[in-house]
Image (spheres, rainbow, N blue to C red):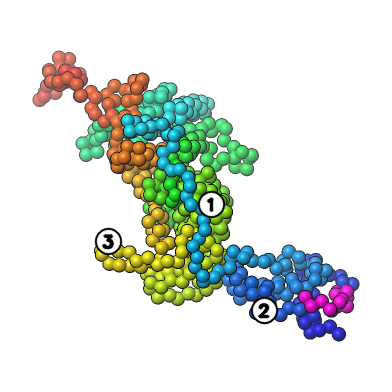
Amino acid sequence: MLSSHLLVCCHFDIHSMQMDSRQLKDCDIQALLEGDNSDEDIICDNSDDDPDYVLQEFQNNEDSESENEDMDQTVITNNIPANLAGASKSRNRLQQPDPRALWNEVDAIPTLDVFNDISGVTDDFQLDVNSSVLDLFSYFVDNELIDMFKQQTNLYARQKLRKMRSSESLTVKSRMNEWKTVTLVEIKNFLAIIFHQSISQRPQLIDHWSKDPTVASNYCPNVMSRNRFLLILSNFHLNDNYLFKKRGEPGHDPLHKVRPLIDNIQRRFQQAYLPGEKITIDEGMCAFRGRLQFKQYMPQKPNKYGIKLYMLSEADSGYVWNFSVFCGQSNVVINIVTNLLGSLSGAGRTLYTDRFYTSPELARELEKIGTALVGTVMKNRRGLPREWKNLILQKGEQIFRRSENLLAICWKDKRPVYMLSTRHTAQMITYQTKRGTEKTKPACVLDYNQNKAGVDLTDQLMSYGVFDHKTVKWGKKLTFHCLLMSVVNACILHNKVKGKKMSVTQFMKLLCTELPICEGDSPRQGSCGGQLGRLSTGNHFLEKNSNPSRKDKNTENVQSLLC
């Protein structure tokens, strides 16, 4: 007669197999009931001596009692011989937990690679203390890229004119009737005006050319006429629209409109500079409220609607080393982080992330490629210690668990703070605040607070000058955002190369002075980088106009000798 344990196991196995789509035949069930009962492995005893049962206490993927019951059933069916469990192999097989996921209360010093890479300005960035502001900016946006702007703008204008003429929508008063082929000098002057408008805001775009003394500006009228600027702005383009692949077609690229600029400055960012040991990854936002498939909403950002960028920056300077634009693709965090790291992995760097990225899985993947991770984490992340779910701590108290090099800390400040680190121990450090009081915090929390703001620093620097005029063309918004990112990186390198601290606003002022007047160019008469070129030489006197076009009885028409 079969033992009670065997009857229970067989009854459960038959019931579970009947639930499966691949049911057993009657002959198979009879063979099961008449099988050999001498095998002791089929007896399931959920005691503390059973190693499979003990391992289940450390399996952190279940969040409810029902899921725990399913796991217990999986243990039972897994102990049945292979010939009895063929109906549900993939579902009922016990998945052994990773031993590295076992948490303990013994602290230890992590054994990770020490930073062994070079950092700073590379040899490819052949600029020195004598280099001008324009030289630094031209490294990222060189004449070859500006020439591409010119060619694509002229191409788009010709295509637009052809389309308007064929559809008979080109009216007499249309500004496109005045279109002339744009030159390299005009593109540089156009970019200079864009940068000037970024640091000198006006209520409307045309107010930069207004004669109203309350909003008048001398810079823009002396660099380019208003109509010419608006004409170039409406036709400004970076890529041929006829080469765009529609959604669903092979080779479709959502960023086709800005792809040449993104690829160019990404390569230049990485060639010019290597960040130090501490780097950060976070999201940036290019403000845009128009219609766009991959427009994002981020309530924590100053600009809540726009195009989201994943950015990797140096922690202390904010230099953007790499970035990618989120355009609706898969949001797998590990892929995002490893793609941004690129060649920086394997050098012993430490990556600081926020709770959106941090997880035990990411920490172990980065450990494999020689990169440490420090960051805040959500308490319900898969793989964290189970006791964190209903943890109650007093202010200043902490609890930690360790799994080899991975440290998990819960520390109570005003509210619980959950941290993961592969670079720290659970040591508490006492420090003195600015007010002279002493406070105690975990070492990983102090380190995180000092180095977490790399991308936030970049956003802050970019907020000092932004082309904030409305447009329905998302490609232009993202283009000017990337150009501004290049200006910020050029300013950071300027401060590192020359050992000076220049603000981004001052850097852009000098750039607006130097960009319109380049060697070998012939800027428009009066273009002198913000000075009034027409009035900068000679003396201006008034004389009576001998041939006035319009006479006034009360006044005489007078004009300057030089005007």
Residue 308 location (% of width, % of height): 47, 49
- Count of labels in the image: 3
Badge nearest the viewer, 2 or 3: 2
Q: Earlier in the sequence, mark 3 or mark 1?
A: 1
Q: Is residue 484 above or below residue 5?
A: above
489 on left or right of 385:
left
Residue 243 vs residue 340, the one in the foreground: 340
Q: Residue at x 48, y 35 (%)?
A: 264
Q: Is residue 150 above or below residue 56?
A: above
Q: Is residue 481 visible?
A: no
Q: Residue at x 46, y 48 (%)?
A: 312
Task: Reply yes or no: does residue 266 show up in magenta.
Answer: no
Label 1 is placed on what type of residue?
Gly
Residue 97 location (% of width, % of height): 64, 66
Q: Which residue bears the numbered disc 1?
A: 370
Label 2 is placed on what type of residue?
Asp
- Residues rendered magenta in the picture: 29-42
Tag 1: Cα neighbours inside 10 Å, few (<14), some, or many (≥20)? some
Q: Quadrant of residue 214?
A: top left
Residue 294 vs residue 413, the one in the foreground: 413
Residue 292 location (% of width, % of height): 50, 46
Q: Which residue bears the numbered disc 3?
A: 434
Label 3 is placed on what type of residue?
Lys
Q: Residue at x 87, y 71 (%)?
A: 28
Q: Which residue bears the numbered disc 2?
A: 49
C-alpha span from label 1 to label 2: 38 Å
Q: Is residue 449 above or below residue 53?
A: above
Q: Is residue 138 visible?
A: yes
Q: Earlier in the sequence, mark 1 or mark 2?
A: 2
